[in-house]
Image: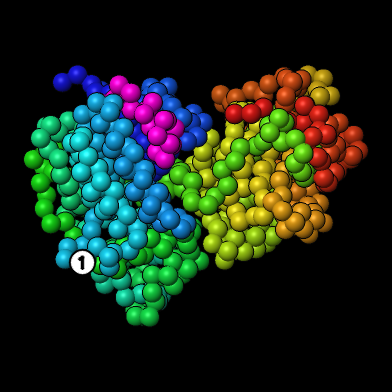
Amino acid sequence: MTGLNCLVTGATGYIGGRLVPELLDAGHRVRCMARTPGKLRDHPWAGRAEVVAGDVSDRESVAEALRGIDVAYYLVHALGGGSGFEDRDRTAARTFAEEARIAGVRRIVYLGGLTPAGIPVEELSPHLRSRAEVGDILLAGAVPATVLRAAVIIGSGSASFEMLRYLTERLPVMVTPSWVNTRCQPIGVRDVLRYLVAGATMPPEVDRTFDIGGPDVLTYEEMMRRYAEVAQLPRRLILRVPMLTPRLSSHWIGLVTPVPRALARPLAESLRHEVVCSEHDIARYAPDPPGSPIGFDQALELALRKVREAEVDTRWSSASLPGAPSDPLPTDPDWAGGSLYTDLRGRDVGASPEALWRVVEGIGGENGWYSFPLAWSVRGWLDRLAGGVGIRRGRRDAARLRVGDSLDFWRVEEIEPGRLLRLRAEMRLPGLAWLEMYAEPSPDDTGAARAARYRQRALFHPHGLLGHLYWWSVSPFHAVVFGGMARNIARAAERLDAETGPAPGAVPAPAATAPAGSAPTAGSAAPARGPASGGGAASGRAPAAEASDDSRPPQT
């Protein structure tokens, strides 16, 4: 059979980002629809797939994305984020089904949640109820649908795996809610992907749901104990406390694991009821190869190996969480009259630009932020208490970043390899914030291989009076936090350069002269006023309408 034209929605998410290369390897042609196409730019498969901008809530962009498509994958869900999310999911699913019919799509494939047998719909968690309703809407449409229903998905970077991993590793003695005794049927992510790929080639008459799961049916307590065995941890002591509701459990999970409360709550709520497959009819259309579906222990071993070898392709945090800021750094025409606070730092570095870039690209996660660790930790805890993501999301890869990666409580908005890393804040703030870091050849370089210039810019767009008060309340600490950060990054680059020299195949930094529209030099708006050797900064208010054009970094 010749390859099909496939549309993948949710390609920036955990499953979608892994499905695309599987479809390509199966001989299909893939178009990805994403609200922020730039997030897919640095994926290894980006050059093999078409990427279009679109949102499932926007009928016109859905219609355009579905043009010429044979099979459409619907892999988006609000994860219970904010009020009215069920209405938004419902409307988006209906729009997608209708536009798929108009476009002549042959099949829709959807990955939903496994719902408990015999439980009235109104007793399900909002998360599971919405997923079930989306599946029903797609099945009720004119286009044949393959609706896959899975419980806990085990794979490196999945939210379920990360929750299980951190709960077990960090708590040798666990006080747990009653839902740890609820049975579920976990499934390895590689089997989920195998079934999703098979969904594309099902016969036209197939229009139904399929339960998918691994061979093991376990309670969550058994899953934690078996994780401890596979990870070679001491036996865990588990104490059950009935009064821990899913709401309280989500706070507890949020404090112990990197999974924020907004995501932990629907995960915990989905475990209230037993979720076990009632059939395995999927095998008629996707026969199980030897050793498949893989067992729970093997799925854990594969996931842990990926984590240890730093080969995690996608993570649960690949997709933006509901409520997280997503506005790009503003351009001048749209910004006229707005306020943009800036903090600029710059230092000359006795290291090569390549070594400086390696430090910049390796920031965050286990490497930390090179400045006042207690302050960063306290800010992360405050963010968690406010319902934000906190600082413990870490990194997908210990050394490499790509656009769209989460990085503690930041997200990578732009990378110019060897030169620029721009991060957008996703912590709870009364405004929008960005942090930019530049590694460049020193402007005074006389040809020496080890002469670089580090530039750093923090930007904040306040929302209302509270936003202005926030900036002025924290600005006295910028000299310690941001100043120390610039100083320590420079020192780390010098140590790295002295120990190892430039990395083989390192991306060379561009020429010292930046093009028009690049980020500010020491002489642009809110200029640095330090000595010629590089220290110092200026923090203050810079009305955007008065800022010069060269104070804006290149836009994506």
Q: In which quarter of the view is residue 171 placed?
A: bottom left
| Residue 103 relative to residue 146: left or right | right
Based on the picture, tell me whether residue 451 belongs to the magenta stretch: no
Tell me what residue is drawn at x 28 percent, y 37 percent. Answer: 97
Quarter of the image that includes the C terminus: top right
Tell me what residue is drawn at x 83 percent, y 34 percent. Answer: 546
Q: Position of residue 365 (x, y in %)?
A: 56, 50
| Residue 316 relative to residue 547: left or right | left
Quarter of the image that includes the N terminus: top left
On screen, residue 123 above or below 10: below
Tell me what residue is drawn at x 53 percent, y 35 percent. Answer: 403
Q: Position of residue 103 (x, y in %)?
A: 28, 26
Task: Give the magenta range.
Answer: 54-70
On screen, residue 35 above or below 272: above
Based on the picture, tell me whether residue 61 belongs to the magenta stretch: yes
Q: Position of residue 41 (x, y in %)?
A: 49, 28
User: Coloring scheme of the render?
Assistant: rainbow
**Which amino acid type corresponds to the residue marked 1 in the rendered image?**
Ile
Q: Nearer the viewer, residue 302 or 386?
A: 386
On screen, residue 211 above or below 500: below
The answer to whether residue 181 shows anywhere in this view is yes
Q: In which quarter of the view is residue 358 placed?
A: top right
Q: Residues within 10 Å of mark 1 (few under 14, many from 20)?
A: few
| Residue 167 relative to residue 227: left or right | right
Q: Position of residue 214 (x, y in %)?
A: 19, 52
The residue that disc 1 covers is 119
The answer to whether residue 11 shows anywhere in this view is no
Q: Nearer the viewer, residue 65 or 161?
A: 65
Q: Nearer the viewer, residue 86 or 510?
A: 86
